[in-house]
Image: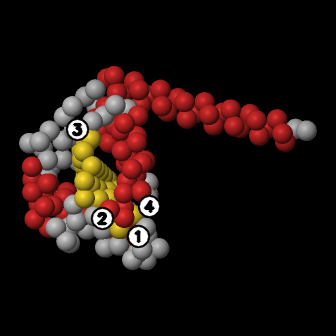
Amino acid sequence: MQPLVGIIMGSDSDLKVMEAAAQVLLDFDIPYELTIVSAHRTPIRMVEYSKSARDRGLRVIIAGAGGAAHLPGMVASLTTLPVIGVPIKSSNSIDGWDSVLSILQMPNGVPVATVALNAAKNAGILAAEILSVTDERLAERLQEFKNEMSRMVEEKASQLEKTQKK
C-alpha cells in the first residue's frame, strides 16, 4: 500500500522515540514509510526526500530530531506538505530544550506543527487527524479512540473516588 505518512529522523538513536508514531499509524491502518534523513550529515538526501515527498504520495511528514533539531524546519522549507516536528531529548541535548525551541521557533512562512518533547505518539495522532479531514472512516476511528480515552479516565476517576469514600 502506498505510504501516506513519512516518518523521518536525524539518527538511528531517535528510533526508540519515533517508533511510537509508527505504532499509532499501524493502529489506524495508515500506511507509512520510516527512514533516517539527517539535515546535517545527509543534506542532499534531505532535499531529495522533501522535494519528492508529494509526488511519491505522502500527505504528511513527521520529522524527529534532537540537539539543534534542524530537520523538521528544513524539510518544511522544501515541501508544501504539513510537517510535524518531534523534539527529541538526545545525548547531546540541553535537557531537550534546544530541540523544542529549534522546532517551535520557526519563522513566518515556514510552519512546523510541534508536539511535546519525545511525544512521537502525539505526532502520529496528529498525522491521523490531518488525514481524517478527507477520510470519514478514519475520522470515525479517531472519534472512537477519543471516546475510549474518555471512558478510561471516567473509569479511573470512579475507582479513585470509591477508594476515597472508605
Q: CA distance from mark 3 to mark 4?
A: 24 Å
What SS does tag 4 mark? loop
Q: CA distance from mark 4 to mark 1?
A: 10 Å
Considering only vertical position in the picture, is 79 above or below 129?
below
Q: CA distance from mark 2 to mark 3?
A: 22 Å
**Residue 130 tag number:** none
Residue marked by disc 3: 4
Residue marked by disc 2: 11
Contact between marks 1 and 2 (CB within 8 A): the answer is: yes
Between 94 and 102, which is closer to the camera in this rendering?
94
Considering only vertical position in the picture, is 106 above or below 140?
below
Q: Who comes first in sequence, dot 2 or dot 3?
A: 3
| Closer to viewer: mark 1 or mark 2 | 2
Residue 81 coordinates in the image, percent (x, y): 18, 47
Crowdedness near tag 3: few (<14), some (14–19) or many (≥20) residues, C-alpha within 10 Å: many
Between 113 and 20, which is closer to the camera in this rendering?
20
Residue marked by disc 4: 117
Amino acid type indicated by mark 2: Ser
Q: Residue at x 14, y 54 (%)?
A: 50
* Left or right of 123, for residue 33: left
| Closer to viewer: mark 2 or mark 3 | 2
Q: CA distance from mark 4 to mark 2?
A: 16 Å
| Closer to viewer: mark 3 or mark 4 | 3
Residue marked by disc 1: 90
Residue 125 appears in the rendering: no
Amino acid type indicated by mark 4: Leu
Picture mark count: 4
* Left or right of 118, for residue 153: right
Q: Who comes first in sequence, dot 3 or dot 1?
A: 3
Between 61 and 134, which is closer to the camera in this rendering?
61
